[in-house]
C-alpha cells in the first residue's frame, strides 16, 4: 500500500504541474493528435470502401461467372448457358419465372463533377428482374427505364460524382444517345456507383449479340446456395464459377482495402516517429526541470518504480489527450465524407463514404497510448537512475 500511495502521490503531483510546462506539453499532444488524425482519416477510406462492398450482397444472392474469371470484365456467357443457369434448382421463382438477371458490364468515360477529369464509370445492361434480384433498389427520382428504349437509370453515387447524369439529361455514349429517366439508391451498396440500361438495347448498341458476362440470382433461401452451386458446377454443359454475392464483393474489395490500409499505416508510422521524438523531448525536458525535486523524493525514501510509473503516467496522459483530440477532429471531418476510388478488379470508379467506426477510434487511442508509453519510458528510467547526490546539486 505504501508503494501504491507513492505512485498516486507523485503521479498526481506531476499531472498538476503540467500547466507549468504547457508549451512543450501542447506541442507533444498536437504531434500525437496529427498522427491519430492521419491514421483515422486514411483507414476510414478503407473502411468506407469495405462497407460499400459488404452491404452489396445478402446470403441469398448469388453471382455466376465463367470459370476462371475474377471479375465480370473477364467473364462471358452465352444465351444457352444463361438458360441452363436460370433453370437450375435453388433459384427463387415467381409467376414471371426465375428471379435472375443476365447482365452485361461495360465501362464508359464520364467527367468528374469536381475536377472535370475523365473517369471510368460502369454501365450495366440488366433485365427488369435485376431490381427484384438486388432487392434494395429504390427510385429516389424519376422512374425505371422502359424495355426496348435508350433509357438509363443512375445510382445516387454516380449522379453525385459524375457529370452528364442529371435527371432528364441526354447522355451520348459512342453513337448512341441515352436519356436519364431515374436515379436510384441501393442502401449504400456498390450499385449506387453504376448506370443501368436495358440489357437487350445495350447489347445491340455494343454489337454483343446474345453474349452476357454474368448472371445475378436470388435464391429461395440462403441454404439453397449449395444446391444451386452443385447443380451448375457438376453440369458438363457448363464451365462456371458460382459465388455468394457477398463473398464475391468481399474478394473484390480485398486489393484496394489492403493497399489503402498499408499506405495509411506507413504514413502514420512516419508521422509517429516525429511525434515520438517530440514526446521524448517533452518528457526529457520535464525530468531535467525537476531533477532536484526527483532527487529529494528519492532521498526521502520514494522508490525508483513509483518515479518511473509517475513519469509514464504524465506521458501517457498527454498522449491520450492528443489522441482523443485527433480522433474527435477526424470523426467530424472524415465520417460520411464522400469520394470515389478505383476498383482494381474492374478498373471502374466506386463511390463511397468515409467510415470512422468505433473500432477505428479505439485503434487510434491505442496508438496514442503506445506513443505516450514509448515517449516516456526512457525519460522515466533516467529519472529513476539519476544519482541522488548529483540530483541534489542540480540548480
Image: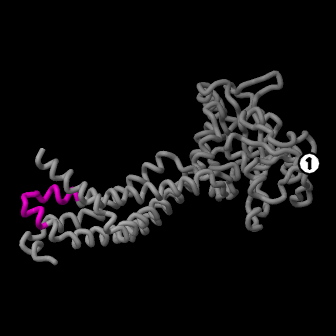
Examine the structure image and report whether residue 304 is included in the region drawn in magenta.
yes
Q: Position of residue 186 (x, y in %)?
A: 72, 41
Examine the structure image and report whether residue 171 is included in the region drawn in magenta.
no
Is residue 168 shown above or below 326? above
Is residue 163 shown above or below 94? below
**Residue occupying the point 72% across, 33% down:** 135
As helix, strand or loop, the secondary structure at mark 1 comes to loop
Is residue 31 shown above or below 190? below
Q: Main secondary structure of the magenta part?
A: helix
Task: Tell me which colouring the rendered structure shows.
Answer: one colour
For the residue carrying disc 1, how many other residues have a C-alpha within 10 Å: few (<14), some (14-19), or many (20+)? Answer: many
Q: Position of residue 384 (x, y in %)?
A: 14, 64
In this view of the protein, which residue sits in the foreground, 241 or 243?
243
Q: Which residues are magenta?
A: 295-310
Can residue 242 be seen in this snapshot? no
Residue that carries the numbered disc 1 in the rendered image: 150
Image side of residue 84 versus residue 151, left or right = left
Image side of residue 203 versus residue 270, left or right = right
**Residue occupying the point 49% across, 45% down:** 358
Screen quadrant of the N terminus: top left
Q: Residue furthest top?
A: 95
**Residue occupying the point 59% across, 25% down:** 223
Image side of residue 356 versus residue 158, left or right = left
In which image quadrant can residue 146 be found? top right
Can residue 78 be seen in this snapshot? yes
Screen quadrant of the C terminus: bottom left
In this view of the protein, which residue sits in the foreground, 27 or 176?
27
In which image quadrant can residue 333 be found? bottom right
Q: Position of residue 385 (x, y in %)?
A: 12, 67
Q: Position of residue 177 (x, y in %)?
A: 92, 55
Amino acid at each position: 500500500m505504501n508503494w501504491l500511495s507513492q505512485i498516486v502521490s507523485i503521479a498526481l503531483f506531476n499531472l498538476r504541474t503540467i500547466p507549468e510546462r504547457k508549451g512543450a506539453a501542447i506541442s507533444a499532444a498536437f504531434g500525437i493528435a496529427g498522427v491519430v488524425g492521419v491514421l483515422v482519416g486514411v483507414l476510414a477510406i478503407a473502411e468506407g470502401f469495405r462497407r460499400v462492398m459488404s452491404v452489396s450482397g445478402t446470403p441469398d444472392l448469388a453471382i455466376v461467372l465463367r470459370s476462371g474469371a475474377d471479375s465480370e470484365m473477364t467473364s462471358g456467357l452465352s444465351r444457352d448457358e444463361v438458360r441452363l443457369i436460370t433453370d437450375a434448382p435453388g433459384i427463387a421463382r415467381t409467376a414471371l419465372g426465375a428471379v435472375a438477371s443476365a447482365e452485361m458490364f461495360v465501362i464508359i468515360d464520364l467527367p468528374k463533377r469536381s475536377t472535370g477529369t475523365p473517369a471510368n464509370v460502369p454501365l450495366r445492361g440488366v433485365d427488369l428482374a435485376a431490381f427484384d434480384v438486388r432487392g434494395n433498389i429504390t427510385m429516389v427520382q424519376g422512374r425505371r427505364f422502359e424495355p426496348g428504349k435508350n433509357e438509363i437509370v443512375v445510382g445516387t453515387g454516380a449522379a453525385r460524382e459524375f457529370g452528364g447524369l442529371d435527371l432528364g439529361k441526354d447522355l451520348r455514349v459512342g453513337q448512341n444517345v441515352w436519356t436519364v429517366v431515374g436515379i436510384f439508391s441501393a442502401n449504400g451498396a456498390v450499385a449506387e456507383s453504376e448506370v443501368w440500361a436495358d440489357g437487350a438495347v445495350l447489347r445491340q448498341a455494343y454489337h454483343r449479340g446474345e453474349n452476357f458476362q454474368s448472371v445475378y440470382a436470388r435464391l429461395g433461401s440462403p441454404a439453397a446456395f449449395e444446391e444451386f452451386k452443385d447443380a451448375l458446377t457438376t453440369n458438363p454443359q457448363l464451365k462456371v464459377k458460382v459465388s455468394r454475392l457477398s463473398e464475391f464483393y468481399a474478394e473484390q474489395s480485398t486489393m484496394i482495402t489492403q493497399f489503402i490500409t498499408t499506405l495509411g499505416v506507413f504514413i502514420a508510422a512516419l508521422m509517429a516517429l516525429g511525434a515520438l521524438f517530440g514526446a521524448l523531448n517533452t518528457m526529457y525536458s520535464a525530468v531535467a526541470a525537476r531533477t532536484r525535486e526527483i532527487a529529494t523524493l528519492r532521498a526521502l525514501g520514494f522508490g525508483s518504480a513509483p518515479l518511473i510509473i509517475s513519469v509514464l503516467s504524465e506521458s501517457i496522459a498527454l498522449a491520450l489527450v492528443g489522441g482523443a483530440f485527433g480522433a474527435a477532429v477526424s470523426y467530424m471531418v472524415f465520417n460520411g465524407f464522400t469520394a470515389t476510388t478505383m476498383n482494381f478488379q474492374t478498373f471502374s470508379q466506386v463511390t463511397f463514404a468515409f467510415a470512422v467506426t468505433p473500432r477505428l477510434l479505439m485503434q487510434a487511442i491505442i496508438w496514442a497510448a503506445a506513443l505516450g508509453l514509448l515517449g516516456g519510458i526512457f525519460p522515466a528510467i533516467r529519472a529513476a537512475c539519476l544519482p541522488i547526490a548529483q540530483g541534489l546539486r542540480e540548480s
